[in-house]
Image: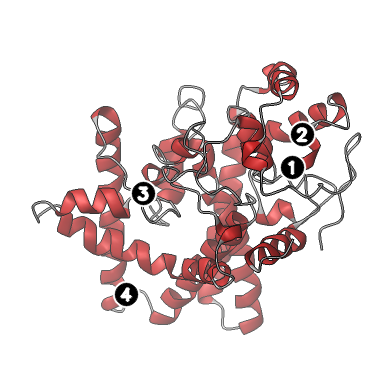
Amino acid sequence: MDSSIALSRGPAIAAPISSATHRVADDKAMLRTAAEATRDLIAPSKAIYWSDLLASVVVGYGALAVAVTTGSTAVMIAAGIVSVLALYRALSFIHEITHIKHAALPGFRAGWNALVGVPMMVPSFMYEGVHNLHHAKTRYGTSEDPEYLPLALMKPYTLPLFVLVSALAPVGVLIRYGVLAPLSAVIPGFRKVVVERYSALSINPSFRRRLPEGEFRAQWLKVETATAVWAVALLTMVATGVIPIRGFAIAMIIGSGVAVLNQVRTLVAHLWENEGEVMSVTAQYLDSVNVPPPALLPVLWAPVGLRYHALHHLLPGVPYHALGEAHRRLSDTLDAMSPYHKASYPGLPGLVSKITRSTMGTR
């Protein structure tokens, strides 16, 4: 289990956040200190990004190969777990791709799509142009935010449903790219529907994305075509017996494991207590979650900097490998009364319990 937090100058456990968090004004001292103390942390490290991605890919696909070919159930389960964790880490780089300046990491987006986005049928364009709306000051937590729902204020059954539906993600992307993509190329008017409703990694069912334009459109079409070709080829190989049904089923289960793990992480990435009002940057920060050291398990369920999700909302331009240092600096610099310390939590169990109690009308 995750161990408790011991911040250097803040409380060990985050104080309860009231339902009026959305009305919190900006703490200018915190915002100013955050910007000034991290100016030297903005540049992404090419060595870290590439080595981390490549290691995750090698381990993830290697363990997948073992899982689908072994005759031992125990080995299959062990390899499957390793594959889920490694591929989840590799897939999480899609979040970095939406924030980094591509000139600072030339070829990384193309490399990620070739190694992860296309094979796993989650190309980067499904997040690019979507996730940035979640960071827009006037959109966060509103009906125009593609990545927000007031989950903490909804019915209790919505939480297990929110997680369980993600298990169908591998089937969903196969349909999206193996069926809908080819059909959208030949059926007039259907292309608009596919782009608006089935081309975004979002949780807000009312979100509709705009049709891509210019250079982004060209990049989108190139990667989508590659993904569609791969999806059709995969389905064909399974149908003709080239890929055994057993191996395909195991791979689909591993894909479901990745999706469920990500959905659980999403469930505790925010407090989800805003009912659509525009929030200050500080309020957005307090509605988000950090799970910093000494907790150990977030390395697995919140990889690639996602354990510092609240800090990321404060400093979206800081690369994932520098967030730990940014957190240490701000924890040491800001006084104990700063709201900065209130966004840190001990670990997953407490966060799940918190949102569950909230849906039941208790705090």
Residue 238: image tag: 4
Q: Quadrant of the C terminus?
A: bottom right
Residue that label 2 marks: 340
Assign a secondary structure to mark 3. Answer: loop
Sequence-wise, the earlier of marks 2 and 4 is 4
Front residue of 351/211: it is 351
Q: Alpha-carbon neighbours of circle 4 within 10 Å: few (<14), some, or many (≥20)?
A: some
The answer to the question of whether label 1 and label 2 lie on touching residues, with beta carbons closer than 8 A, is yes
Q: Position of residue 332 (x, y in %)?
A: 87, 28
Q: Is residue 227 toward the left or the right of residue 42 in the image?
A: left
Cα separation, mark 1 vs mark 2, equals 6 Å
Sequence-wise, the earlier of marks 1 and 4 is 4
Q: Residue at x 44, y 31 (%)?
A: 107
Sequence-wise, the earlier of marks 3 and 4 is 3
Inspect the image, locate mark 4, and give the three-letter code of the amino acid beneath it.
Val
Inspect the image, locate mark 2, and give the three-letter code of the amino acid beneath it.
Tyr
Cα separation, mark 2 vs mark 3, equals 31 Å
Residue that label 3 marks: 207
Q: Alpha-carbon neighbours of circle 3 within 10 Å: few (<14), some, or many (≥20)?
A: some
Q: Is residue 146 toward the left or the right of residue 356 in the image?
A: left
Q: Position of residue 297 (x, y in %)?
A: 76, 57
